[in-house]
């Protein structure tokens, strides 16, 4: 990856035969790690009624972590001009985990996604100097400014879905992921992550480029 935008993403091309069996059953092999991802990327609330006692009560158990931190950093940037480092690190590591699962689901790697090792997926985000690099009021309007990107990304992800289906057939018949499709799918993920870094993670005020390139 080259220096440039504060959000950098790339995936090592698998220049080798991929596992055809796990590729064929990818929609099923991803289920266990998808469950783990669901637990750490969003809270789940379980409720039940206890009607057997003297009084009717409702018990609640919350399972899981809070997912990507958005409201907290927004308020800290807005009122304190701070982005706590451990909040940034949490968002970065969770984004890396999400990316590894997405890469596995997209057939770009047949190595099962790790919860901590980078593997073939490289996502780096510059920690912001909030007072110097981030405007206080920008988090309130970035989602609006990013609308053109959201529209284009909706189309790109739609095309990428069918591109991955084409790669699925190619892997089953040849064992290889077509390089042109691979670069396109990686580029779509790169574009999406840059927009996420700008409008969701709020790590930069630099407007994302309309580009699939590194």
Image (spheres, helix red, strand yellow):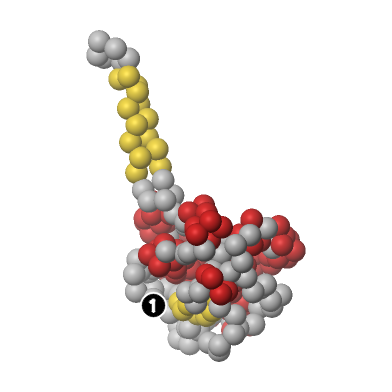
Q: How many labels does the image show?
A: 1
**Dividing the image into 4 quarters, which one contains the C terminus?**
bottom right
Badge 1 element: loop
In-image side of 120 versus 152 (left or right): left
Q: Which of 123 and 114 is in front in this view?
A: 123
Instruction: Name the residue rendered at 69%, 76% in the picture.
Output: 209
Decide: few, some or many residues near mark 1? Use Cα within 10 Å; few <14, some 14-19, many ≥20: some
Instruction: Name the residue rendered at 61%, 66% in the picture.
Output: 135
**Residue 107 locus on image (x, y percent):** 50, 71
**Residue 66 locus on image (x, y percent):** 42, 51
> On the image, which quarter does residue 114 sit in?
bottom left
> On the image, which quarter does residue 140 sit in?
bottom right
- Residue 180 drawn above or below residue 166: below
In-image side of 128 versus 158 (left or right): left
Q: Which of 108 and 209 is in front in this view?
A: 209
- Residue 61 drawn above or below residue 191: above
Residue indicated by mark 1: 119
Q: Which of 149 and 22 is in front in this view?
A: 149
Instruction: Name the residue rendered at 34%, 69% in the picture.
Output: 116
Q: Which residue is most to the top?
A: 54
**Residue 117 locus on image (x, y percent):** 34, 74
Q: Which of 145 and 13 is in front in this view?
A: 145
**Residue 142 locus on image (x, y percent):** 66, 61
In-image side of 115 versus 160 (left or right): left
Q: Is residue 86 visible?
A: yes
- Residue 183 drawn above or below residue 33: below
Q: Is residue 97 visible?
A: no
């Amino acid at each position: 990856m080259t220096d440039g935008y504060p959000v950098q993403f790339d995936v090592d091309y698998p220049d080798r035969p991929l596992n055809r069996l796990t590729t064929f059953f990818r929609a099923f092999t991803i289920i266990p790690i998808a469950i783990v991802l669901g637990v750490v990327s969003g809270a789940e609330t379980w409720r039940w009624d206890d009607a057997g006692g003297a009084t009717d009560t409702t018990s609640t158990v919350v399972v899981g972590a809070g997912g990507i931190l958005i409201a907290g950093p927004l308020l800290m940037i807005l009122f304190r001009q701070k982005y706590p480092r451990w909040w940034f690190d949490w968002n970065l590591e969770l984004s890396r985990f999400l990316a590894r699962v997405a890469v596995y689901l997209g057939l770009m790697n047949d190595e099962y996604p790790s919860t901590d090792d980078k593997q073939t997926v490289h996502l780096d985000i510059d920690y912001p100097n909030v007072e110097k690099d981030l405007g206080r009021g920008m988090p309130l309007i970035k989602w609006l400014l990013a609308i053109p990107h959201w529209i284009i990304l909706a189309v790109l992800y739609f095309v990428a879905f069918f591109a991955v289906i084409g790669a699925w057939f190619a892997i089953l018949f040849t064992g290889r992921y077509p390089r042109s499709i691979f670069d396109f799918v990686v580029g779509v993920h790169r574009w999406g992550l840059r927009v996420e870094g700008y409008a969701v993670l709020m790590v930069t005020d630099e407007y994302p480029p309309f580009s699939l390139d590194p």
